[in-house]
Amino acid sequence: GLELTDGKGVHDGSVLGVPYFQCPAGKGVFAEPARLTGSSAAPARAGAPTAVAGMTPEGAEVETLPSREKSADGSIRLGQQVIWKGKQGVVRYIGEVRFAAGEWIGVEMHEANGVHDGTVLGVPYFKCSSAKGIFAKQEQLQNALTMA
């Protein structure tokens, strides 16, 4: 986990409600060690935030992982409008993820009340603007059309 000093992060050190470290909102990221470039600065002590250069540039083309067209039970489909925690978004990814077990639904929120841009822990699942992406279990989502 890293606290960015320059550029935009995607969280405050907590992901999906799990606190990993603390930093200002929108300054935290996770990255695989192989994706980091260093400077001549001394290594940080364990648990301390670290500044990182060389993150993926804004607008760079990133290939996302393939998604299923629908959830295992067929009740959620790609492109479907859903409600998560009272906020509306559109389903952009359905499938397995590397950060947790089971099937997860990736949602692009209509407002910037998400926590990432579709990439989690360096894995691009879908593309959306910063702070508009979330992942949720199917039972955390409601069909937006039935809520009208």
Image: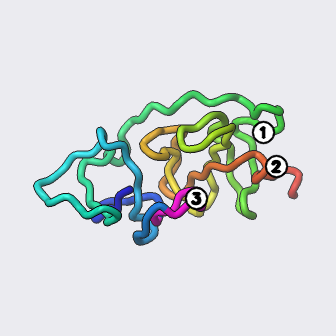
- The quarter of the image holding the N terminus is bottom left
Q: How many marks?
A: 3
**Amino acid type, mark 3:** Gly
The part of the chain drawn in magenta is 12-19
Q: Residue at x 15, y 53 (%)?
A: 39
Where is 23 relative to 133, above or below?
A: below
Percent x, y of residue 140? 76, 53
Task: Residue lying at the far front in this picture: please name it.
Answer: 46
Q: Earlier in the sequence, mark 2 or mark 3?
A: 3
Residue under label 3: 114
In front of the other: 135 or 21: 21
What is the crowding at mark 1: few (fewer than 14 residues within 10 Å), some, or many (at least 20)? Answer: many
The C terminus lies in quadrant: bottom right
Q: CA distance from mark 2 to mark 3?
A: 18 Å
Q: Earlier in the sequence, mark 3 or mark 1?
A: 1
Asked if the residue under mark 1 is in contact with the one under mark 3, i.e. CB atoms within 8 Å, the reply is no
Under mark 2, the amino acid is Asn
User: Mark 3 Cα within 10 Å, few/some/many (few <14, many 20+)?
Assistant: many
Q: Which mark is residue 76?
A: 1
Determine whether label 2 and label 1 are within 8 Å by CB: yes
Residue 128 at x, y percent in the picture: 52, 47
Q: Amino acid at mark 1?
A: Ile
State the residue at coordinates (31%, 43%): 33
Q: CA distance from mark 2 to mark 1?
A: 8 Å
Residue ID for mark 2: 143
- Considering only order in the chain, which callout, 1 or 2, is on the residue closer to the N terminus? 1
- Badge 2 local density, few (<14 within 10 Å), some, or many (20+)? some
Describe residue 89's horizontal placement relative to residue 145 as left or right. Answer: left
